Image (cartoon, rainbow, N blue to C red):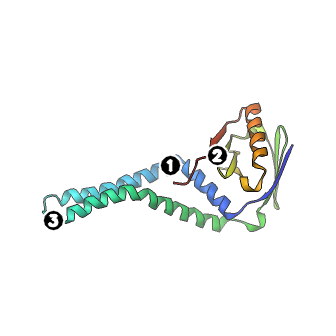
């Protein structure tokens, strides 16, 4: 049996939103499409100025290169700002204290407003990043376990053991960063 008591902060929720976004195929596609579209736009402007002997064509071609390489930095900042605003609006500071009780086959979660229980075998996956453990309940619901506020080694051993026993995928993404 493993019992964990910890509090989640706005930063924990923000990091989870960024992690989820980095694995969302729709967002990945949207970022790539934006990068290509913006670069092509400047490239087309540059091509249209080829017939004119002007300095403008060099500006457009230079802008194409800058946009292609700097657009990911812009979307990184944009999404982080977007998710920060979302977390600010939805974070409930009265509901930040969490208790998780793990047994060999069940998980019970308690906070100030609710208690829920589920079979461990119903979890979809366990993911470990450098700062968190994420326990996926379904496509939209995760438990966030910040490593700095739980006994990380004990949790890792428990989750790896349950992963093998219940055939739940255990993903290690220790080098994950928001890009």
Q: For residue 111, which numbered disc appears in the image?
A: none
Closer to us: 113 or 40: 40
The local secondary structure at tag 3 comes to loop
Closer to us: 47 or 63: 63
Q: Which circle, 2 or 3, is nearer the viewer?
A: 3
Q: Quadrant of the N terminus?
A: top right
Which residue is tagged 3? 54
Q: Please name the residue shown 82% across and 41% down the image.
A: 106
Closer to us: 22 or 29: 22
Closer to us: 97 or 92: 97
Disc 2 residue crowd, few under 14, some 14–19, many 20+, Cα 10 Å: few
Q: Are marks 2 and 1 in contact (CB under 8 Å)?
A: no
Disc 1 residue crowd, few under 14, some 14–19, many 20+, Cα 10 Å: few
Q: Please name the residue shown 58% across and 62% down the image.
A: 83
Q: Position of residue 45 (x, y in %)?
A: 24, 60
Mark toward the start of the polypeptide (2 vs 3): 3
In the image: residue 175, left or right of residue 102 = left
Asked if residue 12 shows in the view, the reply is yes
Where 56 sits versus 119, above or below? Answer: below
Q: CA distance from mark 2 to mark 3?
A: 54 Å
In the image: residue 132, left or right of residue 102 = left
Which residue is tagged 1? 26
Mark toward the start of the polypeptide (2 vs 1): 1
Which residue is tagged 2? 139
Asked if residue 146 shows in the view, the reply is no
Q: Position of residue 111 (x, y in %)?
A: 81, 58
Mark toward the start of the polypeptide (1 vs 3): 1
Q: CA distance from mark 1 to mark 3?
A: 40 Å
Q: Are marks 1 and 3 in contact (CB under 8 Å)?
A: no
Disc 3 residue crowd, few under 14, some 14–19, many 20+, Cα 10 Å: few
Q: CA distance from mark 2 to mark 1?
A: 14 Å
The local secondary structure at tag 1 comes to helix
């Amino acid at each position: 049996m493993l019992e964990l008591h910890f509090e989640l902060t706005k930063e924990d929720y923000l990091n989870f939103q960024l992690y989820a976004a980095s694995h969302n195929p729709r967002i990945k596609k949207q970022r790539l499409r934006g990068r290509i579209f913006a670069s092509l736009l400047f490239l087309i402007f540059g091509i249209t100025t080829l017939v004119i002997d002007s300095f403008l064509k060099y500006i457009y071609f230079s802008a194409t290169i800058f946009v292609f390489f700097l657009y990911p930095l812009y979307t990184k900042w944009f999404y982080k700002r977007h998710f920060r605003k979302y977390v600010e609006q939805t974070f409930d500071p009265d509901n930040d204290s969490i208790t998780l009780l793990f047994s060999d086959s069940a998980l019970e979660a308690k906070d100030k407003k609710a208690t829920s229980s589920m079979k461990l075998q119903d979890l979809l996956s366990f993911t470990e990043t450098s700062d968190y453990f994420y326990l996926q309940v379904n496509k939209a619901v995760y438990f966030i376990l910040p490593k700095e506020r739980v006994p990380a080694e004990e949790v890792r051993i428990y989750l790896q053991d349950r992963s093998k026993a219940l055939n739940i995928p255990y993903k290690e993404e220790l080098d994950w960063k928001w890009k």
